[in-house]
Amino acid sequence: MQRHKELEKNTVQLSLEKAWLERWTEFVSLFSSQSDWATFGKVLGTIGSGSPISNEDKLIACAVLSNFRRAQQLLNELSELHTWLSPALTSKERVSLVDQHAPELSAEGMAFQGLRELADLVKKNPIGAAPKRRSVAVRVVDLRRSKPKLSWMQATIECCNCGKPKHTQGCMQVVRQEVMALEKVLHKYGIHPTDNVKV
Ligand SMILES: [Zn+2]
């Protein structure tokens, strides 16, 4: 219950989850056309044979290749975002995340059935756990947004999970470095948590 409440208020966490899900949805949609795949396979099979390839088939094969490139970029982004999703989502949480965002995503052009299949895919593909420390940075960023006057040391005392009885200057340095890394990621993905998530 406590954890649930904390997550609800944790706008950075929610924004990161949403950014992850948007990319995952696009990733899956890149591979949704079976007929394009069939054409791609046909073109590959024809290349060595010297038989002519129609212009239409060439165009489709090129589009499939460019989807590959986009997919590669999305995979990099997905794994980067996932390292900040902490605690790492369980498969149940990932599926409920898909359900939760299904209405808005289907409004953006993806059929609900597609999302159900997506949910199954997410369920089948667990991704490694995020490093524990990352959650500290996420909490500190949220805390400092809600209490801008809080010092770095005060934020460290409230959020550091090092396990030592007393948090040190060393803890604070590590926290600041982690927060800087997180701010970079948020900036890179255009995430402004307070703009797009209800608190
Ligand atoms: Zn500490």
Image (cartoon, rainbow, N blue to C red):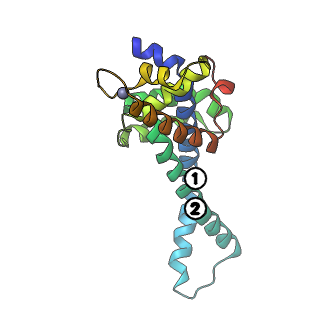
What is the distance, in whole Å, between disc 1 and disc 2 at their CAs? Answer: 10 Å
Q: Residue furthest bottom?
A: 50
Tell me the kind of residue under disc 1: Leu
Q: Report crowding for label 1: few under 14, some 14 to 19, many 20 or more residues within 10 A (C-alpha).
A: some
Is residue 113 in view? yes
State ligand 1's quadrant.
top left
Tell me the kind of residue under disc 2: Arg
Vertical relation: 99 (above or below) 46? above
Residue depicted at 42% across the width and 28% down the height: 93
Q: Secondary structure at mark 1?
A: loop
Q: Is residue 188 left or right of residue 72?
A: right
Which residue is denoted by mark 1 in the rendering?
30
On-image quarter of the C terminus: top right
Is residue 117 in view? no
Q: Position of residue 139 (x, y in %)?
A: 49, 25
Q: Are marks 1 and 2 in contact (CB under 8 Å)?
A: no
On-image quarter of the N terminus: top left
Which residue is denoted by mark 2 in the rendering?
69
